[in-house]
Image: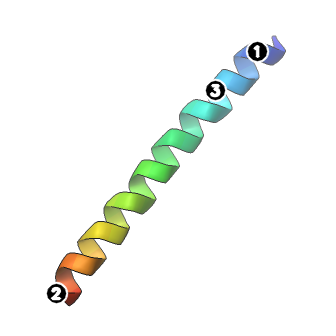
């Protein structure tokens, strides 16, 4: 059960990290 919770958290963290990097890159494209 603990392993499952860790996997879900890692998956959620990947999605959040991906959204942040997407926003970061699009922000820099606007400034360019």
Task: Read off the residue under disc 3.
Answer: 8
Secondary structure of the residue carrying numbered label 1: helix
Q: Position of residue 13 (x, y in %)?
A: 58, 43
Residue, x 66% and y 33% (percent of image)? 9
In the displayed structure, 25 sits above or below 15; it is below
In the image, farthest residue toward the bottom: 31
Q: Mark 1 to mark 2: distance in Å?
A: 43 Å
Task: Read off the residue under disc 2.
Answer: 32
- The residue carrying pointer 2 sits among few (fewer than 14), some (14 to 19) or many (20 or more) residues within 10 Å by Cα, namely few
Left or right placement of residue 13 versus residue 15 in this view: right
Q: Position of residue 32 (x, y in %)?
A: 16, 87
In the displayed structure, 20 sits above or below 11; it is below
Q: Mark 3 to mark 2: distance in Å?
A: 36 Å
- The residue carrying pointer 1 sits among few (fewer than 14), some (14 to 19) or many (20 or more) residues within 10 Å by Cα, namely few
Dot in front, 3 or 2: 2
Q: Are marks 1 and 3 in contact (CB under 8 Å)?
A: no
Along the viewing direction, whichever of 9 and 32 lies nearer the viewer: 32
- The residue carrying pointer 3 sits among few (fewer than 14), some (14 to 19) or many (20 or more) residues within 10 Å by Cα, namely few
Instruction: Identify the disc placed on residue 3.
Output: 1
Q: Mark 1 to mark 3: distance in Å?
A: 9 Å
Secondary structure of the residue carrying numbered label 2: loop
Dot in front, 1 or 2: 2
Secondary structure of the residue carrying numbered label 3: helix
Q: Position of residue 4 (x, y in %)?
A: 71, 15
Task: Identify the mark nearer the N-term, 3 or 2.
Answer: 3
In the image, farthest residue toward the top: 1
Residue, x 81% and y 11% (percent of image)? 1
Q: Position of residue 7 (x, y in %)?
A: 65, 22
């Amino acid at each position: 059960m603990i392993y499952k919770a860790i996997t879900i958290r890692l998956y959620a963290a990947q999605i959040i990290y991906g959204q942040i990097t997407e926003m970061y890159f699009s922000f820099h494209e606007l400034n360019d």
